[in-house]
Amino acid sequence: MESYTRYERARIVGARSLQISMGAPVLVKTDKIDPLEIALVEYQKGVIPITVKRS
């Protein structure tokens, strides 16, 4: 997994959490129901389909 700044991590997890809360499919098996917690698990497993474009 690429090394992200804390701001990039926050943006990635926040964006993914919003996607999950709007009905996007969950990419990991978990018992959690809070979209933020699910997004954090996905981030830790490296399965979030979001990339960071730097100039």
Image (cartoon, rainbow, N blue to C red):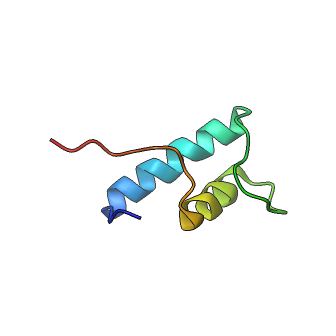
Q: How many marks?
A: 0
For residue 45, side relative to residue 20 (left or right): left
Q: Residue at 34% across / 56% down in the picture?
A: 7
Q: Is residue 4 left or right of residue 42?
A: left
Q: Position of residue 4 (x, y in %)?
A: 33, 61
**Quarter of the view holding residue 21:** top right
31 horizontally vs 2: left or right? right
Residue extending furthest toward the right: 31
44 over 9 or under it: above or below: below
Query: Where residue 8 appears, x then y in whole percent?
Result: 35, 54
From the viewer's perspective, is 24 left or right of 48? Answer: right
Q: Which residue occupies 39% across, 45% down?
A: 51
Name, please, the residue furthest toward the left.
55
Quarter of the image that includes the N terminus: bottom left
Front-most of 35 and 47?
47
* Coordinates of residue 36 in the picture (x, y in percent): 64, 54
Residue at 52% of width from left, 44% of height from top? Answer: 49
Residue occupying the point 67% across, 60% down: 37
The image shows residue 12, relative to residue 42, as above or below, that is above
Residue 43 lies, in percent from the top left, at 55, 60
Point out the residue furthest to the top here: 22
For the C terminus, the quadrant is top left
Q: Is residue 35 above or below residue 2?
A: above
